[in-house]
Image (cartoon, rainbow, N blue to C red):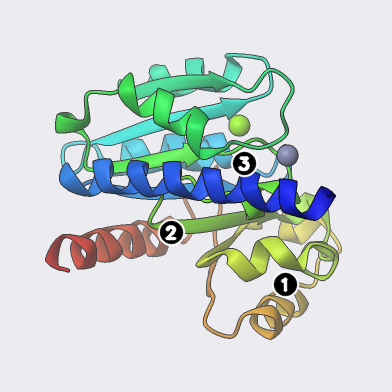
Amino acid sequence: MKVPIVANILKANDSIAQQNHEALRAKKIFAVNIMSSPGAGKTTLIERTINTLKGELKIGVIEGDIQSTHDSEIIAKTGAQVVQINTGGACHLDANMVSKAIEQLDLSSIDILLIENVGNLVCPSNFWLGEDKKVVLTSVPEGDDKPLKYPSIFLVSDAVIINKIDLLPYMTYDIDKVRQECLRIKPEIKIFQLSSKTGERFDEWIEWLKELRKEKLQG
Ligand code: MG
Ligand code: ZN
């Protein structure tokens, strides 16, 4: 009986995700689901993205956390609209939680919605939230074995961001190995290597976001 129950949960999730997707499309919002293990730098990436695009594109943020409001307070300081989801212990966001969060946002003043998932490299890969693209972050201090150990999340992602490259001189981290492993899992995956802290090569990520948003609006 276990298999049908799990399948039904995912099916219910996908139909709510589809509603989220339609609601965002109606408002011409491009949405990205950002996933990683805890501490890979999702919040810092979002913060710099907001600040880089300030005056050009308006960013809305949904912050998924098991308990605290720590990250949403950081985002609120940028002036961007932010809604916090406390999952109450759940280790991933689902479409129903995101649907409730979307109701709290003024969608008419958002161009790009960034959804920070709960820090976890396993089950977030199973839940479509209604977003257009999925991005997985992996950071230099975590070690260079993440794609090898958690291939599913790299397989479902449209892009991978190798974050904290400013720490490369101090770590044993084979960045070419990580790139090759990502491409082996998914040949068409887009790979960024940047530092959200120093801003090094951050413009490539920003250009990708802007380009894909434009494609969505034209499509
Ligand atoms: Mg965070
Ligand atoms: Zn989970």
Which marked residue is nearer to the observer: mark 2 or mark 3?
A: 2
Which residue shows up at 14% across the image and 31% down it?
108
**Image mark for residue 15:** none
Which residue shows up at 50% across the image and 67% down it?
158
Horizontal side of 186 relative to 206 (left or right) equals right
Which residue shows up at 75% across the image and 68% down it?
151
Would you place residue 43 above or below residue 176 in this image? above
Q: Residues within 10 Å of mark 1 (few under 14, many from 20)?
A: some
Of marks 2 and 3, which one's residue comes earlier in the chain? Answer: 3
Name the residue carrying label 3: 41
Name the residue carrying label 2: 133
Q: Is residue 198 among the parts visible in the rendering?
A: no
Q: Residues within 10 Å of mark 2 (few under 14, many from 20)?
A: some
Q: Is residue 65 among the parts visible in the rendering?
A: yes
Q: Residues within 10 Å of mark 3 (few under 14, many from 20)?
A: many
Of marks 1 and 2, which one's residue comes earlier in the chain? Answer: 2
Name the residue carrying label 1: 175
- Ligand 1 lies under 8 Å from the Cβ of mark 3: yes
Amino acid marked by disc 1: Ile
